[in-house]
Image (cartoon, rainbow, N blue to C red):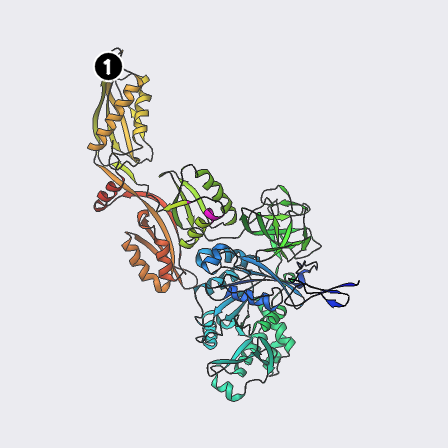
Amino acid sequence: MQLIVFVYINKRTIFQLQIFLNGEYVRTPEVHRLERINLKKFDSTKIKNIAIAGHAGSGKTSLTEALLYKSGATDRLGKVLDGTTVSDYTPDEIKRKCSVYTSLSTMETGGFKVNILDTPGLFDYESGMVEGIYASGCVMITVSGKSGVKVGTHKAYDCAKKFGKPTMFVVTKLDDDNANFNNVLTQLKAEFGPTVCPVVVPVIADRKIVSYVNLIEMKAYKYENGKAVETDMPTAEVSEKMEYRIDGLIEAVSEAVAETDEELFEKFFSGEAFTQKELTDGIHKGMNEGIITPVTCVSSADLSGVDMLLKEIGLLLPPPSEKDAMVGETPDGDMVEVPCSESDPLSAFVFKTVADPFVGKMSYIKIYSGTIASNKEVVNAATGSTEKVGKLVTLQGKKQIDVAEAGCGDIVVAMKMNVNTNDTICDAARVVKFPAIDFPKPCYKMAVRAKKQGEESKISAAIARLLEEDLTLAYALDTSTNEMILSTLGGLHLDSVVGRLKNDFGVEVITDTPKISYRETIRKKVKVQGRHKKQSGGHGQYGDVWIEFEPCISDELVFEEKVFGGAVPKNFFPAVEKGLQESVKKGVLAGFPVVGLKAILVDGSYHPVDSSEMAFKMAASIAYKEGMRQAEPILLEPIGALNVFVPDDNTGDMMGELNKRRGRVLGMNPADKGLTEIIAEVPMSEMADFTMTLRQMTQGRGSFTFEKVRYEPLPANLVADVIAKNAVTD
């Protein structure tokens, strides 16, 4: 008997077994697949780290899926609507049919290892975009061929430039009947300037794409059954009907490349055509310097143009060896440059954390120098503590593939390490700390309480885990209202957090609009008596005080005594003060704490037998209640300082909105990128839904900060409503 087993590699099927017994093929009930373990190690010249960012719905996840499929990293093409994509795999993402978290996927193409960070586009999940772009070496910004440039396009571009990342625009959804590449290209040039440089453009006839022209290769391709076939370049007649001329685009590309080098500029000026290598090298250099932003186009649905994009990834996008030099701070406070060199000591940065209740903490690490390996001893530069590197994996969405080690420029995930986002881990031979990522500040606040009594501690523990993962969350006790306040970036962000608390940690919460911490005070000076007398057989209770109450400038009760002749013995002064201190916790109007109150003990009387500390404490409380009623009590509302940034076109609308909210505009300042800063003071009771209003008014371009600064009298027309909602009975 002869048994022969063939193992072959297929682009679609990673590994497949065929079994022959005595020369005959043995049909097996199922195809056996083996896990492909990537044993090949790539140096920093053969790695590309790409963040795919852009406006929500512009095709980021679909592009990721198409790249993975076309490169052979996956054997099927998933769809967002079906919930079958590699990068959108969490229940929340499948339910919402959009990206909520930044995911990591890996592929190999053209001899390069490519780490793809698929980032969210919704503004509520902006932290994912920020952390993905920070860790990338280049940012692909998707722009829908149907809807064009949106606010999310600008946010992704601005974030990339903030971190000094090269950018590339990818026009997607060209298979849509309403897509218009020409309009999108014109819009990109108008809004992002002369750096925009098309490298792949579609040839359109009768509103259909007939081929794609690669302006670097000067070749045209048409797609038959998903495969690219070289075809003739468009004729002059076809080009005349297009809204752009091919020769004009070639001229624009050549001009952009000429700006990158003096020799190339002289060659361009003399009228000579650039070679394909000169164009490639020029665009590559221009991307590194931030003076060229290539534009390519794809249809992720039928995969047209995806193969050309894979070529551009290998030719144009910079590897870590060119762009990943970092500047860090030593323990002595000195700044030092850390080159991307594998021979240097290890230095790596934790840019993302996942708090998985089943797998444990997963730390996403970008390696900037040296090599990281499992069980290696490292120093956490943020805390000074020594940690041991956990198991290392690379990811294909949710699928984990073990790796023994990874070199500089690569991205890996360490399991169950005691490190957090923004921590730098390094070799003890060179301790250096890299700058932390500046995440958006949470501005949408809601009160949170347990749905079931007794689960408050479980909620706090679960949210503590989420706070490690998401630095755009905040959770704190409002001491003025005794409510736990959860702050997020918006309503969708809040829904996701509440969903994770229930599904991942088994705790249900109820959210509500936070209470407003009003205060009470008085407007005039009064003198009142407080007498507590009680006789019940044996020793009775007797306390008698005269107290003057008057307004003052203080958040705490100011207590003084001016008793003459021993009308009230000194040993009862503390009891009087204690009675007042307990009383000012609740005002007489609606039960809010009292501020701006000064109490002066001026007179009283006592009984040598029946007087006690308790009696004088009760007498002080009686005097307080009577004095507050006579001293014209009023309600005070908290006022916050607002700094809001809005597009210049929305300035008038925002001024009107602030007037509706009883705000006072204090000034206006011009800001960058067509924005205006409005400085105002607004009552906190009017700001509950301001986050949503601002987002709707500015389509997501606006931002604001808001902090409580002081208290002011509540307008008389609003007092009755506040008292009705908050009044307490004695």
Asked whether residue 591 appears in the rendered view, the answer is: yes
The N terminus sits in image quarter: bottom right
Which residue is at a point 59% across and 60% down the rendered structure image?
A: 105
* Left or right placement of residue 85 versus residue 530 in this view: right
Q: Which residues are magenta?
A: 500-508
Q: Is residue 128 left or right of residue 333?
A: left
- Residue 660, by quadrant, is bottom left
Mark 1, Cα crowd under 10 Å, few <14 / some 14-19 / many 20+, is few
**Percent of width and height locating residue 635:** 26, 40
Residue 506 counted in the magenta span: yes
State the image coordinates of residue 684 (x, y, percent, origin top left): 33, 47
Which residue type does callout 1 highlight?
Answer: Ser
Classify 122 as above or below 716.
below
Magenta stretch holds residue 155: no
Q: From this view, report whether residue 408 is shown above or below residue 446.
A: below
Q: Nearer the viewer, residue 83 or 280?
A: 83
Find disc 1 in the rendering and name its residue.
536
Q: Position of residue 681 (x, y in %)?
A: 32, 50
